[in-house]
Image: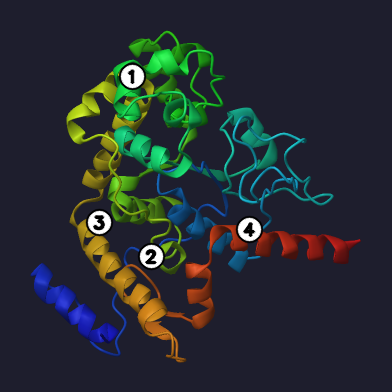
Amino acid sequence: MEYEQMMANFTEHQNVSVNVQIGEAPVNQSIRNIRYKQVAFLKIHKAGSSTAQNIFLRYGYSRNLLFVLSKVRKEQYDNVISLSSSLNENNTIAPPINKTFDVLCNHVLYNREAFQKYIPGNTAYIGIVREPFEMFLSTLNYFRPEYIFKTIKAITPVLNYLVDPWKYEKGLPLTYSLTNNRMALEFDFPKHLFKTYSKEESEAYLSKLDQEFHFVIIMEYFAESVVMMRRILGWSIKDVLYVKKNSAKKYSFVDNTYRYLYQRFAKLDYDLYNFYYIKLWEKIKLEGIDFQLELSFFQNLRKAVEDYCIKHKQTVLPYHVPDSKWSTAFNVTRKDCDLLLLNEMKFVSLIRQRQQTNTTNQK
């Protein structure tokens, strides 16, 4: 569908008056200057983070920004800095002399002091969370942790685990577990809370996080989150376009009637998720009706771009997006599509090669 027709349909369905004429640019009331060039994204396993990561990879790559990358290790994937610690000199490549990093978006545990050391200055801190039970099921499907699927000799090992998680978590190093409040672990919650839960201390730590993170994406409301993030960061609509990645097929280990068992165990993860779920809707409410209009516009545009990139691969001409209330005009090119669709491992490898080349040329 042509963009102009899409805009006409959008206006008709929204039953609002928008001052748009074909060939005439509307008043760009919501276009904002870039507020944050540097960004640290806390990439959480099985929380839709690969889809979000692509936004930050494209943003940095298109501007030739400097990424925090892991040292090359045989036992670890290229997109993982660490699954058990935060940034340090043993797991990262040092920046070139007299330069500092601009973008962090690979897997690593959060620690405020470490993050600030590696990306100082006016850096936007972005996180992502997912409904914990859904994340638990996705984790089981992807990682198949041995302490559940091999240790538990039962017809229903997952249900047995949920009835008494501590029976199977006992003795596991906290960083080894993929199911013991993993989001809270990666957000650096105080370690003693994983054994002795305190609602008061959990809330106190969430207040601390709220001062440190500019925004946290809710996976279940990804489009809403991305539009809000765009406004907070002052980035363009083109910057935050995305194509869904790593969407697994449906899986069933236990049904939703047992969700309460995981809620009973994963208290920190539920505190974290509920806190930022409420924050998202509070922010959206403050934005007013213009946010809903931008969201509808963005969702339609995103689907059109996804179709252009996937269903119209033979089309050579770029997909043109004229001025709108929320964006200046831009083109989506075949190169843009390549980056939108690029696997994260290949993308990180591409960035690694370019940074190595740049470093060599500067010597």
Badge 1 vs badge 4, beta-carbon distance below 8 Å: no
Q: Secondary structure at mark 4?
A: helix
Q: Position of residue 138 (x, y in %)?
A: 37, 42
**Mark number, residue 348:** 4
Depth check, front residue: 230 or 60: 60
Circle nearer the N terminus (4, 3): 3
Dot 1 amino acid type:
Phe
Residue placed under numbered mark 2 in the picture? 31
Q: Amino acid at mark 4?
A: Val
**Label 1 sits on residue:** 265
Marks 1/2: CA–CA distance? 44 Å
Q: In the displayed structure, does residue 165 sit left or right of residue 340? A: left
Q: In front: mark 2 or mark 4?
A: 4
Check disc 2 and give the amino acid type.
Answer: Ile
* Residue under the image location 39 percent in, 11 percent down: 197
Query: Pointer 2 and pointer 3: residues touching (CB < 8 Å)?
Result: no
Of callouts 2 and 3, the N-terminal one? 2
Q: CA distance from mark 2 to mark 3?
A: 13 Å
For the N terminus, the image quarter is bottom left
Q: CA distance from mark 1 to mark 4?
A: 35 Å
Q: Report helix, strand or loop for mark 1.
A: helix
Residue identified by numbered label 3: 291
